[in-house]
């Protein structure tokens, strides 16, 4: 087996990964009206690359209840075409909402930035 070619391929894959920075802001919170007393949060997100260029901005919905936090994959899939960025965004949305769950009450929220 040619290990040299294998390692060169791995290096190329690692070089193609980009670093992204996410900025989130709660836009609106609504009652979902289900048996789990879920709430739907509309989050405004800005995604920047490592050069601080704006890659994407848009609204994404996240549902949460006492059981867990569930971003809407359809919202992400409609707006983001990179599978890597989709996975990162879904993970970061969950991470953003988790510490705020008990403070998010229904209503509209003013923009912070």
Image (tube, helix red, strand yellow):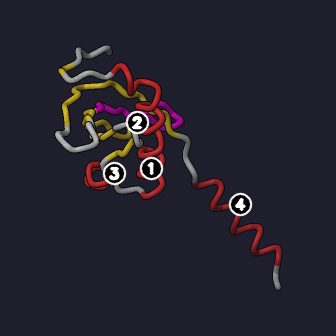
Q: Which residue is mark 3?
A: 80
Image side of residue 30 versus residue 84, left or right? left
Residue 98 higher or lower than 82, as above or below: above
Contact (CB < 8 A) between labels 1 and 2? yes
Query: In the picture provided, is 10 more to the left or to the right than 18?
Result: right
Give the spatial CA distance, label 4 vs label 1.
Answer: 20 Å
Quick one: label 2, few (<14), some, or many (20+) residues within 10 Å? some
**x and y percentages locating residue 103 in the rendered image:** 36, 19
Earlier-in-chain disc, 4 versus 3: 4
Mark 1 Cα within 10 Å, few/some/many (few <14, many 20+)?
some
Mark number, residue 11: 4
Q: Which residue is mark 1?
A: 85
Of 15 and 38, the residue lying toward us: 38
Residue sitting at x 23%, y 18% = 109
What secondary structure is marked by label 2? strand
Dots 4 and 3: beta carbons under 8 Å?
A: no
**Sequence-wise, which precedes: disc 4 or disc 2?**
4
Identify the residue at image location x=57%, y=51%: 17
Q: Which mark is residue 47?
A: 2
Question: Is residue 7 covered in magenta?
Answer: no
Q: CA distance from mark 1 to mark 2?
A: 9 Å
> Range of the magenta residues?
43-53
Looking at marks 1 and 2 on the same chain, the residue that comes earlier in the sequence is marked by 2
Of marks 3 and 1, which one's residue comes earlier in the chain? 3
Please give the name of the residue rendered at 31% of the width and 40% of the height, measured from the top-left corner.
Answer: 62
- For residue 52: magenta? yes
């Amino acid at each position: 087996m040619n290990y040299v070619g294998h390692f060169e391929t791995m290096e190329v894959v690692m070089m193609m990964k980009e670093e992204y920075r996410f900025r989130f802001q709660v836009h609106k919170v609504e009652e979902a009206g289900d048996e789990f007393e879920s709430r739907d949060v509309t989050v405004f997100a800005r995604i920047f690359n490592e050069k601080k260029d704006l890659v994407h901005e848009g609204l994404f919905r996240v549902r949460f209840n006492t059981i867990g936090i569930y971003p809407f994959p359809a919202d992400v899939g409609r707006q983001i075409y990179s599978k890597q960025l989709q996975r990162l965004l879904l993970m970061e949305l969950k991470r953003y909402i988790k510490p705020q769950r008990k403070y998010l009450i229904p209503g509209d929220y003013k923009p912070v930035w």
